[in-house]
Image (cartoon, grey):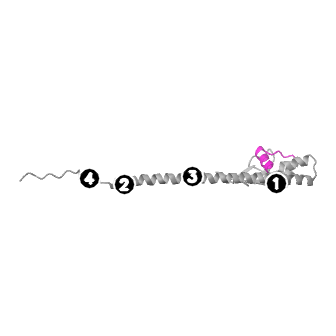
Amino acid sequence: MRRQGRSHRAYFQIVAADARAPRDGRYLERIGTYDPQQTFDGVKIDHKLALKWLACGAQPTETVRSFLSKEGILLKHHLFIKGKSPEEIERTYQDWARSNQTRLSESRNEYRKKQQSVVEKQAASEVTSRAKKVAAIQAKLQENAKPAHSEEAAPEPEADSAE
């Protein structure tokens, strides 16, 4: 993987590189991209190029291996190594992709529900905290509106007895 982007906004290119090349240095071919800022669909890989490089003996890193596995590329490669026909590989991949799609849609829906509940909890806590603040301000205003001395309890000024 080849890191690009600015500070705290990184994205990566998935590349085929010589093991002796530096991390962000020279590479042989760009296979795909990975954007960690996106919750879903952050990985885009060209299946044909990935399969070509795996067939040539490329050894993916752990992270790239997990991406290839989630995309089904390692399944295709495994079936190719086992000597399956291209039609059988495609049929098996399509079955896997359908089941994987339902699993992904369920996890996306679950994630959206969780995000919605977080937003609702934040809104409810804002309403309660705002109500507490308003009550505190009203109490303070009522306290200031009350006269400090009542007229009945106030002592009358004494008359001068100088006469």
Magenta stretch secondary structure, dominant: helix
Measured Cα–Cα span from mark 1 to mark 3:
36 Å
- Residue type at the position of mark 1: Arg
Q: Nearer the viewer, mark 2 or mark 3?
A: 2
- From the image, tell me which residue sits under label 4: 150
Measured Cα–Cα span from mark 2 to mark 4:
15 Å
Query: Is 45 placed left or right of 80 in the picture?
Result: left
- Residue type at the position of mark 3: Gln
* In contact (CB < 8 Å): disc 1 and disc 3: no
Q: Earlier in the sequence, mark 1 or mark 2?
A: 1
Question: Which x, y percent locates residue 31?
Answer: 80, 53
- From the image, tell me which residue sits under label 2: 142
Question: Which x, y percent locates residue 21?
Answer: 78, 46
Under circle 2, the secondary element is helix
Q: Residues within 10 Å of mark 4 (few under 14, many from 20)?
A: few
Q: Earlier in the sequence, mark 4 or mark 1?
A: 1
Measured Cα–Cα span from mark 1 to mark 2:
66 Å
Q: Earlier in the sequence, mark 4 or mark 3?
A: 3
The label shown at residue 49 is none
Measured Cα–Cα span from mark 4 to mark 1:
81 Å
The answer to which of 151 and 119 lies nearer the viewer is: 151
Work out which residue is located at the far left of the displayed protein and give it: 163
Q: Which residues are magenta?
A: 56-70
Q: Quadrant of residue 91?
A: bottom right
* In contact (CB < 8 Å): disc 1 and disc 2: no
Measured Cα–Cα span from mark 4 to mark 3:
45 Å
Q: Nearer the viewer, mark 4 or mark 3?
A: 4
- From the image, tell me which residue sits under label 1: 98
Asked whether residue 58 is drawn in magenta, I would say: yes
The answer to which of 159 and 27 lies nearer the viewer is: 159
Q: Residues within 10 Å of mark 1 (few under 14, many from 20)?
A: few
Asked whether residue 152 is drawn in magenta, I would say: no
